[in-house]
Image (spheres, helix red, strand yellow):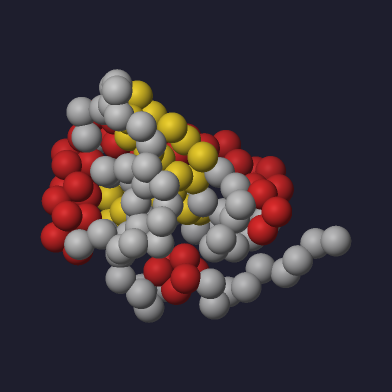
């Protein structure tokens, strides 16, 4: 059973400018911004501008352009955060671990010898998010 897209989800509000974010990238296809409850320093989210609840809801014609943006942002995160590698995650529906029901990819920079943190619900300080966003923007 398919569940309808809720245009009042937090990411839709960010897209409409109704909620703030620490933006690292935006074009006509996607928006990338800092996760306010990061599991790693520099944790970035990439969302499509096309309303889609999950990956299977994104129109096929939109998948390629969106994934190109995910790849572009991932490279900037790796470069800007001087990371050794990346973890890229995407969750679908509650049973799959999705919390916000607007399609999004998590880009998590990783460093050798540093375990991945948890998405604990603790909000990062805005000045730290702004500093990391600036580092990632410089990585493009």
Q: Based on the displayed image, in which of its 4 quarters is residue 116 positioned?
A: top left
- Relative side of 122 to 136, left or right: right
Quadrant showing the C terminus: top left
> Where is residue 53 drawn, in percent x and y?
64, 60
Q: Is there any visible trace of residue 40 in the rendered image?
A: yes
- Relative side of 134 to 117, left or right: left
> Where is residue 92 drawn, in percent x and y?
65, 50
Examine the rendered structure and indicate whether residue 79 appears above or below residue 37.
above
Q: Which residue does the image show at 71% across and 48% down from the upper left? A: 56
Q: Which residue does the image show at 54% across and 63% down from the upper left? A: 100
Along the line of sight, which residue is nearer the eye, 50 or 32?
32
- Relative side of 60 to 69, left or right: right
> Where is residue 138 drawn, in percent x and y?
16, 39
Q: Is there any visible trace of residue 139 in the rendered image?
A: no
> Where is residue 115 drawn, in percent x and y?
36, 32
Examine the rendered structure and indicate whether residue 82 appears above or below residue 58.
above
Along the line of sight, which residue is nearer the eye, 62 or 43?
43
Along the line of sight, which residue is nearer the eye, 123 or 72?
123
Q: Which residue does the image show at 45% across and 39% down from the upper left? A: 70
Q: Based on the displayed image, in which of its 4 quarters is residue 101 positioned?
A: bottom right
Quadrant showing the N terminus: bottom right
Along the line of sight, which residue is nearer the eye, 95 or 42?
95
């Amino acid at each position: 059973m398919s569940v309808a897209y809720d245009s009042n989800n937090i990411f839709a509000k960010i897209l409409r400018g109704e909620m703030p974010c620490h933006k690292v990238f935006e074009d006509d296809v996607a928006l990338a911004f800092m996760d306010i409850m990061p599991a790693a320093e520099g944790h970035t989210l990439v969302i499509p501008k096309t309303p889609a609840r999950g990956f299977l809801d994104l129109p096929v014609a939109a998948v390629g352009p969106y994934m190109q943006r995910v790849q572009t942002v991932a490279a900037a995160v790796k470069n800007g955060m001087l990371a050794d590698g990346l973890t890229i995650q995407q969750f679908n529906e509650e049973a799959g671990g999705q919390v916000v029901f607007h399609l999004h990819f998590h880009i998590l920079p990783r460093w050798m010898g540093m375990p991945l943190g948890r998405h604990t619900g603790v909000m990062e300080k805005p000045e730290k998010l702004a500093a990391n966003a600036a580092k990632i923007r410089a990585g493009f």
